[in-house]
Amino acid sequence: MDMDQTRKEAFREATARYHRRTCIRFVEVEPNFTGVRLRVANDDPSICWATLGYHNTTSGYFKGGRFNLGSCMNLNHMGEILHNLGHVLGMLDEQQRPDATRAYYGHGPHLQVFWDNIPSRWMRSFTANEGAYTGSRYDGTRDPWFGHAPYDFDSIMHFPPTLYGSHLYETIPSAKMRNVGQRNFLSEGDVLQLLDSYRCRRRTTTTTTTTTTTTATTTGTTTTTTTTSMSFGAGGCIQNPDCAVNPWCNDPSYQSWCPIHQSPCPEPWCVGSQR
């Protein structure tokens, strides 16, 4: 089916929300573009879904990934579009983390899952996946995150506790139930995962301020050099309680890092460059 303008508007707004908080930018290309791309279509209007991560195949448009907007018809479905764009970028469902339902390297479990209530088609989304993001190793002084990443009950990638009348799980602790499964915004944990996975680097610039003072007998010049941040990335992190142990997040400034060229980019879009 043809893609209508309402769906296009919703998709463009979703990509803009990712761009505003990370170094990732989606760039529209012509249909005859032969590089890596995400094909966005309305092939099946009854469902909204996307492929997970990058698909290295030469089978036509599938080289890269697919996104069927379908039932994500307009801005009212922004949460589901954001969720599926997370899959496009390689993010698994949060409850697929190995520490979700069991102890894992001293963390978890965070959910009590009622397995008998989970339909077979969703079972994989609750099964522990060792490839799910749980943090990363230290990668230098400009690394946006290292160590264990706390389980994110607020993640846009987390399933809600109830679907189609089935009660799927309880959170541990129970107080975390209040916002789990939300589809309103990218959480700080979502942003952090992408900053870390796509190597969005912090950057600083040096500014010099010269002040001239005059007294009755002397005139002096004082030069003060300070390091200030260039604003880009995870705004609002100062409200994150994890900042107590990760001081970088009070200074949410990042430089785009291009994994293709292994160098900083002049613009924060080249994670989508042709490979």
Image (spheres, grey):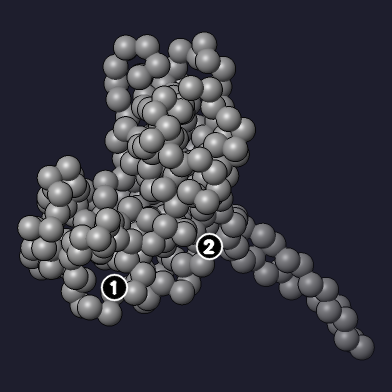
Q: Nearer the viewer, residue 183 or 186?
A: 183
Q: Residue at 13% of width from left, 58% of height from top?
A: 117
The residue shown at (21%, 56%) is 95
Give the camera-side residue of 110 and 146.
110
Residue 264 appears at what percent x and percent y?
49, 38
Query: Is 31 left, or right, of 156 in this rendering?
Result: right
Disc 1 crowd, CA 10 A, few/some/many (<14, 14-19, 20+)? some
Q: Given the image, on which type of amino acid does mark 1 rest?
A: Met
Helix, strand, or loop for circle 2? Answer: loop
How many labels were placed on the picture? 2
Q: Amino acid at mark 2?
A: Gly
Pointer 2 residue: 235
Instruction: Examine the rendered structure and indicate whether residue 18 appears above or below residue 215.
Output: above
The numbered dot on residue 257 is none
Q: Position of residue 210 (x, y in %)?
A: 76, 67
Tell me: residue 221, above or below residue 272.
below
